[in-house]
Image: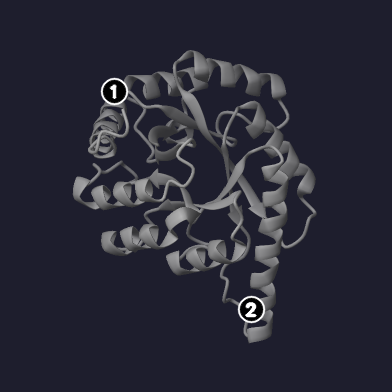
């Protein structure tokens, strides 16, 4: 089942109650809570309160978004485990993180490139095992300035990792055409577990979702659901103005996606 949610980072200046109110008003199903905005690591009581407030509003926690960057060794395992514990308390089925390095192919020698790539694969597999013990899926995020700044690199890495609890977060990358972005999601197939809909103009203001672009994406995401008992999430991630216009744009995007998700009657 594909469900719709809100990235709490889209309302970075609102408290948790304000984020929950925006999600409820837009008739969304879930919230991804951001570690850098609304719930950091270590405060287990705050995480438990936030989990209960989310559930009491009729929502679920889709994901725990962290800025954790998976390094070339295990030096940050303590911090990783602390983040994973917070995700567990939030009842988040997914924890988002990043890969290290500027490029999979940055080194000059073929041997060094292969060694760096293999190190990434091994490290993610080890962390995937730790996440699996808590039933949490790790989702690598793509973005400018890291080794997953291109779709082809992300597809190659997650395919090599091939771990049940290590997946990919898909989103529109800067500079990619709509067709290339959609094709990348199709190629990711079962390795994509989370979609971030982050459409924004150069001034940072959200742009309306284009249904023609998103129809094929939603259909592809549905076809690769894997375990049909588990929900997969499409999250609205564009930053919203801190005024009624921001809530209206969120509601419009949510309605557009809801229509596409519900087309075949398999989702509410």
Give percent across and percent down for residue 42: 73, 30
* Disc ID at residue 6: none
Q: Which residue is mark 2?
A: 113
Query: Looking at this view, is 185 or 64 the one in front?
Result: 185
Q: Quadrant of the C terminus?
A: top left
Position of residue 15 in the picture relative to residue 81 (left or right): left
Give percent across and percent down for residue 162: 59, 60
Q: Which residue is mark 1?
A: 244
Mark 2 is surrounded, within 10 Å at the Cα level, by few (under 14), some (14 to 19) or many (20 or more) other residues, namely some
Marks 2/1 in contact by CB < 8 Å: the verdict is no
Give percent across and percent down for residue 18: 44, 19
Q: Quadrant of the N terminus?
A: top left
Outermost residue, top direction? 56
Name which of mark 2 and mark 1 comes first in the sequence.
2
Q: Residue at x 72, y 41 (%)?
A: 133
Disc 2 and disc 1: Cα gap in Å? 49 Å
Query: Looking at this view, is 126 or 250 the one in front?
Result: 126
Which element type, helix, strand or loop, lies under badge 2? helix
């Amino acid at each position: 089942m594909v469900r719709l949610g809100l990235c709490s980072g889209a309302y970075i200046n609102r408290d948790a109650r304000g984020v929950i109110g925006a999600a409820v008003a837009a008739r969304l199903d879930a919230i991804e809570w951001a570690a850098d905005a609304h719930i950091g690591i270590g405060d287990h009581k705050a995480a438990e309160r936030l989990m209960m407030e989310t559930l009491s509003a009729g929502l679920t926690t889709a994901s725990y978004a962290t800025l954790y960057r998976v390094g070339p060794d295990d030096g940050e395992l303590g911090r990783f485990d602390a983040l994973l514990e917070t995700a567990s308390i939030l009842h988040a089925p997914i924890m988002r993180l990043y890969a290290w390095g500027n490029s999979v192919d940055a080194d000059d020698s073929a041997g060094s490139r292969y060694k760096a790539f293999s190190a990434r694969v091994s490290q993610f597999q080890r962390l995937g095992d730790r996440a699996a013990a808590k039933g949490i899926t790790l989702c690598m995020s793509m973005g400018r300035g890291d080794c997953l700044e291109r779709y082809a690199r992300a597809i190659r890495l997650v395919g090599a990792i091939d771990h049940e609890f290590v997946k990919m977060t898909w989103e529109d990358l800067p500079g990619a055409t709509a067709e290339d972005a959609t094709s990348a999601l199709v190629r990711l197939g079962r390795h994509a577990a989370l979609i971030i809909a982050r459409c924004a103009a150069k001034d940072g203001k959200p742009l309306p979702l284009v249904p023609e672009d998103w129809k094929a994406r939603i259909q592809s995401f549905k076809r690769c659901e894997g375990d049909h008992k588990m929900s997969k999430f499409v999250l609205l991630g564009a930053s919203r103005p801190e005024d009624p216009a921001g809530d209206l744009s969120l509601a419009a995007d949510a309605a557009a996606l809801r229509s596409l998700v519900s087309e075949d009657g398999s989702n509410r």
